[in-house]
Image (cartoon, rainbow, N blue to C red):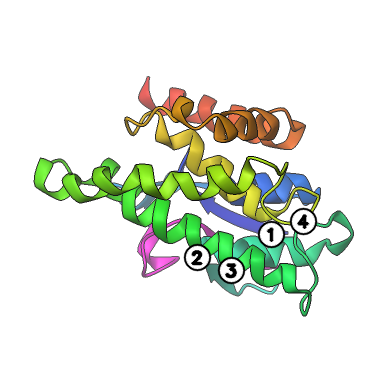
Amino acid sequence: MLQLYFSPMACSLSSRIALMEAGLEARYHLVHLRTKKVAEDEADFRGVSPKGAVPVLVLENGERLTESAAVLQYIADLKPERGLAPQPGDVDRYRLQEWLSFVGAEIHKAFLFPTFWYQDDASLAKPRARIAQTLSVPSAHLATREFLVGERFTVADAHLAWALLLLRPAGVDIAQWPPLVAYLERMQARPAVRDAIATEMALRKAMAA
């Protein structure tokens, strides 16, 4: 069975969404990112991955895969009939990689990561200044499209949906980009997306209690 190391509402949520959209069973391991401890046994998470970051997907042969873009594409390729990623060689496969890279670099690492991990205004000034320009890109793209790539839901949508969910607690109201508001509503209407979010929000609430 696949195993996913995750932290509630972290970027690993997109991997949970992908697993659920693919109909794949997995064992989930909760990680406390600030302490780098695996919740079930208090083991050092860096023993699982020296990067100390989620997601980590443990494959059925025991190999470990990290980085959302790689994990998401691997999950998609396990169930090609679900259409969660275009086939290798299709130009849309590169569009998928393009959007995974954009979300990872321009929204996650450039804005969400410093917002949730840094406290001083000097460190946050540049990310805050850039986020409006960054979000205008997917907003314009989605103004006339239902999904990021092609005509169906892909793992790129799982990744962008997660990022958009985190923007509000990061201090960004996406109401100023109506296409993104409509897009996120569509994504949250999907049963797998809705259930994945509900599961992690419940865990997050329990951890805060």
Instruction: Provide residue 55's location: percent of width, then percent of height.
Output: 51, 57
Q: Which residue is mark 2?
A: 67
In this view, the residue in front, 19 or 82, is 82
Q: Is residue 25 left or right of residue 128?
A: right
Residue located 63% across and 54% down the image = 156
Mark 3 lies on a secondary structure that is: helix
Q: Which residues are magenta?
A: 45-60
Q: Is residue 11 visible?
A: no
Rendered image quadrant of residue 145: top right
Instruction: Provide residue 59's location: percent of width, then percent of height.
Output: 66, 68
Q: Residues within 10 Å of mark 1 (few under 14, many from 20)?
A: some
Return the residue found at the far bottom.
89
Residue located 64% across and 27% down the image = 185
Q: Main secondary structure of the magenta part?
A: loop
Q: Residues within 10 Å of mark 4 (few under 14, many from 20)?
A: some
Position above or below: 158 against 49: above
Mark 2 lies on a secondary structure that is: loop
In this view, the residue in front, 157 or 79, is 157
User: CB of mark 1 within 8 Å of CB of mark 3?
Assistant: no
User: CB of mark 3 within 8 Å of CB of mark 2?
Assistant: yes
Mark 4 lies on a secondary structure that is: loop
Q: Which residue is mark 1?
A: 2
Q: Which residue is mark 4?
A: 150
